[in-house]
Image: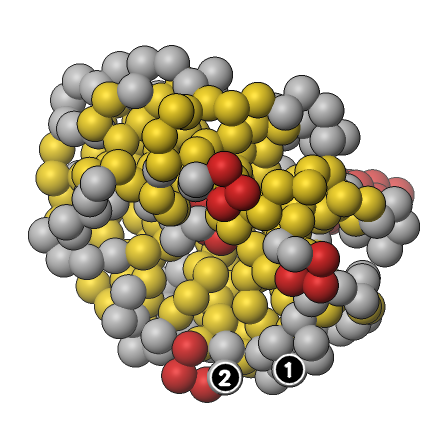
Amino acid sequence: MKKVFVFVLTCLVSLSFTACTHANAPIVYGNTNGNIINNGYVALQGDRLYYLPINGGICAMNLDGNDRRQLSTGGGIYLNVIGNRIYYGGGGLYVVNTDGTDRHQLSGADACYVHVVNDKIYYSDANNNYSLYVIHTDGSGWQQVSNACCMYVNIMDGRIYYSDFDDSRHIYSMKMDGSDLRQVNGDSSVDIQVVGNQIFYCNHSDGDKLYVVNTDGSGRQPLTDDQSVYFNATADGIYYINHSDGDKLYAIHADGSGRQNLTDDAVSPPVNVAGGRIYYNNMGTLSSMNTDGSDRKPVG
């Protein structure tokens, strides 16, 4: 009887440890919210940069520019990298190994705002009013999460955030399974980007100015009077194309301070940030610069 009790107790402890280990497992994201909202032209894994040249294809190189390789000649958008796999949209939902092998289609959906989180892929389907879906990274388990018009989808800390174009572009959040739906603000909000417990967005209700609001709906305030048509919000700062000043690139802190002009000429979207550099479209060529505006050069 004593041996049976010890065996049962051992099993219970083992199960409890496994459950705790699983519950505390880190969340792995395939890219940042800011990059995905800017079409996901670059994705960083360690010191390896995966990127989309403006003229098409998928390439990879080290952050120092060495060991550049072309992985695919096909088009792509919304790059995500997890493990040895690259996931992306563009006329369907695709996956390819980081060495360029075994490219295949996971879904025929016109996948937008693609986010890979651990072993699941979340995306809005442009062919179905941008309803939100989820599918496993092996292509199984497809299901609908929301039938709302989910634009500018973000994922952060177990919740999904989006601008509902069926409801005046207000920001909503929900759990990963679509439950616990909450309205965050009442502004016409585009290009929304979640960083920590803050949401940055371009406020169409106030001249496309850059605003911030907490994820619980509190703390809503403007950050600048500039018309900020494209931006990328990171933990280190916000980088935006200032339409009020000839589409030059600017930087500003998350509290609205430290506004700085980074370029003397116009730049074009998208604006991606990875490895301490800003990536942007310069006259049809993917180019980059340091986050202080120095060392501008073409990529690859």
Task: Locate residue 39, reporting x and y percent.
Answer: 39, 53
Circles 1 and 2: CB atoms closer than 8 Å: yes
Question: Label 2: how many residues lie within 10 Å, few (<14), some (14-19) or many (20+)?
Answer: some
SS under mark 2: loop
Q: Which residue is mark 1?
A: 166
Q: Residue at x 78, y 71 (%)?
A: 181
Above or below, 74 against 6 in this view is: below
Above or below, 258 against 21 in this view is: above
Would you say 207 lies left or right of 136 here?
right
Q: Residue at x 84, y 49 (%)?
A: 220
- Asked whether the viewer can see residue 168, the reply is yes
Q: Which residue is mark 2?
A: 129
Q: Amino acid at mark 1?
A: Asp
Above or below, 264 against 5 in this view is: above
Task: Locate residue 276, reporting x and y percent.
Answer: 45, 21
SS under mark 1: loop
* Residue 10 occupies quadrant: top right
Q: Amino acid at mark 2?
A: Asn
Residue lying farthest front? Answer: 245
Task: Locate residue 205, reporting x and y percent.
Answer: 71, 63
